[in-house]
Image (cartoon, grey):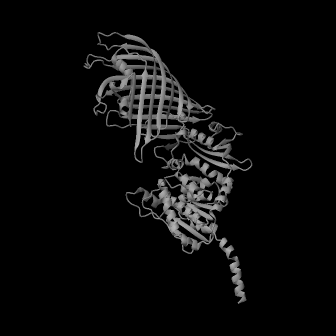
Amino acid sequence: MKKNLLLLFLFLLFLPMLVQAQKVGLVLSGGGAKGLTHIGIIRALEENNIPIDYITGTSMGAIVGSLYAMGYSPDDMETLLKSEDFKRWYSGEVEEKYMYYFKKNLPTPEFFNIRFSFKDSLSLKPQFLPTSVVNPIQMNLVFIDLYARATAACDGDFDKLFVPFRCIASDVYNKKQLILKRGDLGDAVRASMSFPFMFKPIEIDSMLAYDGGIYNNFPTDVMREDFHPDIIIGSVVSTNPGKPKENDLMSQIENMVMQKTDYSLPDSAGILMTFKYNDVSLMDFQRIDELEKIGYDRTMSLMDSIKSRIHRRVNVDNIRLRRLVYKSNYPELRFKNIYIDGANTHQQVYIKKEFHTSDDKEFTYEDLKRGYFRLLSDNMISEIIPHAVFNPEDDTYDLHLKIKMENEFSVRVGGNVSTTSSNQIYLGLAYQNLNYYSKEFTLDGQLGKIYNNAQFMAKVDFATTIPTSYRFIASISTFDYFKKDKLFSKNDKPAFNQKDERFLKLKVALPFLSSKRLELGFGIAQIEDRYFQNNVIDFDKDKYDKSGYRLFGGSVSFNGSTLNSRQFPIQGAREALVAQIFTGNESFRPGVNSENKKPVKEKHSWLQLSYMKEKYHKMGANWILGWYLDAVYASKNFSENYTATMMQASEFAPTAHSKLTYNEAFRANQYVAAGIR
């Protein structure tokens, strides 16, 4: 009897210690935007003092789990995932202030281009289908800002995070899961969420890693084997793919790619919460409030059961204090050295200059961000994959850049397809090369019934303290106009007006803000207009009157664009302010049978000012309002006759088709025009 009482006393004595030692693991499944439910679960557990000692997650579960593991509170996660920055990350869009228009060429009507190189052997890279739905340009960079400091604080060991963490990726070559427990935390999370075709895969240990949900979308086994918790709380927001449907490509891809996952959790092992969503898509992140509330409410409904299974409690204020202390040890993002892989010595010099830094000068994440987008605004580099490696000796980071250079040559094919006479074919050949400076040479042209053009362009960019671009253009073009009696008439009629243009231009450009550039231009031009001045034409007798112009001009312009599409934009703005001065000679030669006309030569000099702006505003979920303003003032004198004057006048051409038609009602030396798009 005494022995039994002694055992009971010892049990009661050590019971608090046994309870205190109870460890809780949280397992979060993948599921795209449905994984926002996990935030509500974490919020409910924290509010009720339920401990979270370990986290494992896959895909979206890895994102939410990693944020919590590195010290984010539920409020912090909600703020981040509601931010405009996050929307840009998963859409691949770039903020306007980082759109470096300075390096952009004028848009061309290409449908696709094929890049190739002759360096070692002929390599072809068609560029009309993207390798992923989401452009990786944002994620390649922002994961440094999001995860580099946490990686430095834990020294690349995920057991040393605020909450020990594991995430799952997939090695599709060896057909197995990858359990990521150390290394770059950002790379681990990106690999875990890289759903095939939607996101580009990440290279880990020289192997492409894809979404962990392919082989293990609910890693309870990893939780048990790596952390051995006393109890597991599981959150499942996904299901195994259903039977593929004939007309549903996504269901077919899921069945081909995804292996079946065991989403069960024995009652003896823990508590399982399963959520079934039929109307939430992969990218429905705007529904965060709704999904988080569902997770919170479900957890609160089970709280009595959870508390009966988990006896240990943690104080919320204590968690906040520990979180604050842990995050205070994050080393600030200050970069010093740059190491570049994938570029030769000369190219490395150019790339480093874009960050405006020397080897012994520190620079910030903002400097990195601006240099990153400056480099990618050029056509020379297809992708930059940056990594930040912490140096504990001086509390700075080394910046490692993996550069993927574009092939030097490209063939471009495009045009315009229309039911009217404005069909065009576009062909182009380009060569580009990056060394101490960036250079590009392009020969392209268009063929059509109305407009024909051939153009050569040579461009050289210098990555100096104030970047400078030099551009030489030689062009020859012909117009054989049609006319419209009404602006929206379907009937094209021959206008019997023809134009030949030849010009040489030299332009020097400097960056002005981020989305604009200042250009100084000089050029010479030779123009010949051929036309009839009479309404009644006898082709057996009458010949074209001809007006020729030899001109020299100079220009100063501020121009820029953040439009998101070449032809049908719904976002951004385009603006140009141009001042030009011209001087030159006009020569008029009447047609052979123009008995009452004599050749005329005149000298012209004039100033021309123009302003154009196009801007788009989001008016609602499905409505975009665009407006267009075009204004021109020219002090030009009249040419020898009315028709010659109108052919040389500036034109208002708000549509693609109107650029190829001759309509005197929309031509003048001075005008202001505006409209809605």
Percent across and percent down for residue 631 are 42, 27
Which residue ends up furthest to the right in the rendered image? 393
Which residue ends up furthest to the bottom in the rendered image? 1
Please state if 280 lies on the left or on the right of 217 as rendered: left
Position above or below: 407 against 323: above
Percent across and percent down for residue 7 are 70, 83
Residue drawn at x 44%, y 25% as measured from the top left: 476
Please state if 183 lies on the left or on the right of 485 as rendered: right
Residue drawn at x 66%, y 47% as measured from the top left: 333
**Res 317 → quadrant:** bottom right
Position above or below: 604 against 270: above
Q: Is residue 205 visible?
A: no
Percent across and percent down for residue 380 are 56, 38
Position above or below: 469 against 384: above
Q: Quadrant of the N terminus?
A: bottom right
Q: Is residue 651 visible?
A: yes
**Res 446 → quadrant:** top left
- How many numbered badges does the structure rendering display? 0
User: In the image shown, does 89 or 46 lie closer to the viewer?
Assistant: 46
Position above or below: 575 against 321: above
Percent across and percent down for residue 433 are 57, 35
Q: Quadrant of the C terminus?
A: top left
User: In the image shown, does 112 or 562 lie closer to the viewer?
Assistant: 562
Please state if 605 lies on the left or on the right of 180 as rendered: left
